Image: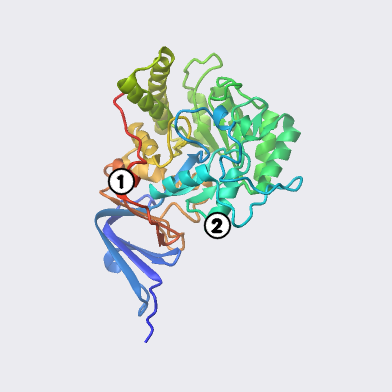
Amino acid sequence: MPTTAPTYTILTADRLIDARGGAPIENGAVLLDGSTIAAVGRAADIRPPEGAPAQATHYAGCTILPGMVDCHTHHNGFGDGRLGDDLSLLLDEVLPARSARPARPGHPPARPPDEPPPARPARNARASLFSGVTTIRENGPKNVTMFRLRDAINEGLAIGPRMVLCGHPVAIIGGHMGYFGGEVTGANDARALTRQLIKEGADYIKIVATGGTTRTSFPTLPSFNIDELRAVTAEARKFGKLTATHSSNSAGIANSLDAGVDMIIHCYHLDADGTVNFREDIAERIERQGAFVNPTLQVSRATAWDLTHKRDEQGLTAPEQSELETARANLDVRLDHTRRMIDMGVKVITGSDSSWSSYQLGNTVYETELLVHAGYTPMQGVLSVTSWAADALGVSDTVGTLEPGKAADVLIVRGNPAADINALWNVEDVFLAGSKIKRGSDDSIAAVRQPPAQI
């Protein structure tokens, strides 16, 4: 007689973290019903419906937890130290494997069903997923390259995490990341671009409220005025979209709060002349308004590590030595400011900012580790990259915790990340929508991890 293939999967381990805020469940289990979680609890209490076949796997010495959620990625990037200015010079035909069909006026390019997905973003997406990140929020790609990658993943032509996309960022002329295709002037233009991005498929709107590393921008000065910022946030809110601002100075943070943004990215407390000046009044406003903060700490450390390796192997030029010293100093300052914001009750979450600068995708755990250095307990670190991150992205109804009815995005790691956050590196298996991901050889997976350096 034909047998019925199991539709249920039972995963058991020494412990389970459901990321709902409680202690780990000893001898925990999660029951998957296809792409959905059916039950979570103690292994002794979890069973499939009577008579239903189930495939069971026990992970000795391991912890089951939700797939990680990275709130800040750049899948167009290389993570090799190049500036975004240089990345923008690559043709869209280089970022994807080949160009999309020409678009009709006012419409995004249409990608033929047999066209390969964007090559660099697709490689980065695999690295993210294989590392245990099952949901990402992209923070600024070139043109529509990430929309095309999401299309390819949905059509089964590529593999990658769930994606929360913004399209290109909203920037001023000459402003940070304006080279990706979203430069505007005035409230009307800002509002129009917001509508265009939503039309193209944006899940949220990324606004560049200050300068940054872009050569033509001014990192210690605000970019948009309040009217322009409010035009974007009001339009996004009207269509149910969240907003986030790149803010690398105090004035930009304050302007973002005036406009009612939902997340502050970087959140550097710098005066107009570049002086480091932690503003408690601004941090109090962030906490009071309930905005999330994504401090992007690892970017500085990744730069310092990269330059330290180069120094030890071949030496540094005088400008590179200066860059190394700046990266070290920036890390110390940003750890201190993040610690102070955590102490004030600000909602700080994990967003890696990889692959930007020298920080490569597949290494999200380094950012979470630094949040623990800044004051979180290891369990809070886990929450910052699971349930709190999902809340920040507005996707907590689907991912971020292990609960019945949610997506079966599950991570199994060796050890106990509630005691040692670095256990998140020890990935045993990753499930996305109930399917176990084939992650390749141990050597290829290990090669993705960037080597630390003593700085």
Q: Pick the residue in front: 2 or 28.
A: 2
**Residue 263 in the figure: left or right of residue 28:** right
Q: Earlier in the sequence, mark 1 or mark 2?
A: 2
Which label is found at residue 272? none
Q: Nearer the viewer, mark 1 or mark 2?
A: 1
Residue 49 position within the rendered picture, expressed as x and y whole percent measured from the top left? 37, 75
Q: Is residue 22 above or below residue 322?
A: below
Observer-nearest of 441 and 360: 441
Q: Is residue 229 visible?
A: yes
- Look at label 2 and name its amino acid: Asn
Which residue lies at the image location 30% right of the left edge and 49% below the top edge? 442
| Residue 27 appears in the figure | no
Q: State the residue at coordinates (53%, 54%).
A: 153
Question: As displayed, is residue 214 above or below residue 11?
Answer: above
Residue 41 horizontal/vertical position (percent) = 33, 62
Question: In the rendered view, would you say 248 is above or below 126?
Answer: above
Dot 1: what SS?
helix
Amino acid on which disc 1 is placed = Asp
Cα separation between marks 1 and 2:
28 Å
Quadrant where the N terminus sits is bottom left
Residue under the image location 48 percent in, 24 percent down: 280
| x, y percent for residue 310 | 35, 23
Residue 143, given in percent of the width and then of the height, sits at 63, 40
Report crowding for label 1: few under 14, some 14 to 19, many 20 or more residues within 10 A (C-alpha). Answer: few
Q: Which residue is mark 1?
A: 443
Question: Quick one: which residue is furthest to the left in this view?
Answer: 61
| Picture quarter with the C terminus | top left
Q: Which residue is mark 2?
A: 154
Q: Examine the image and state in which quarter residue 217 appears.
A: top right
Q: Residue at x 38, y 56 (%)?
A: 438
Asked which secondary structure carries label 2, the reply is helix
Q: Residues within 10 Å of mark 2 (few under 14, many from 20)?
A: few
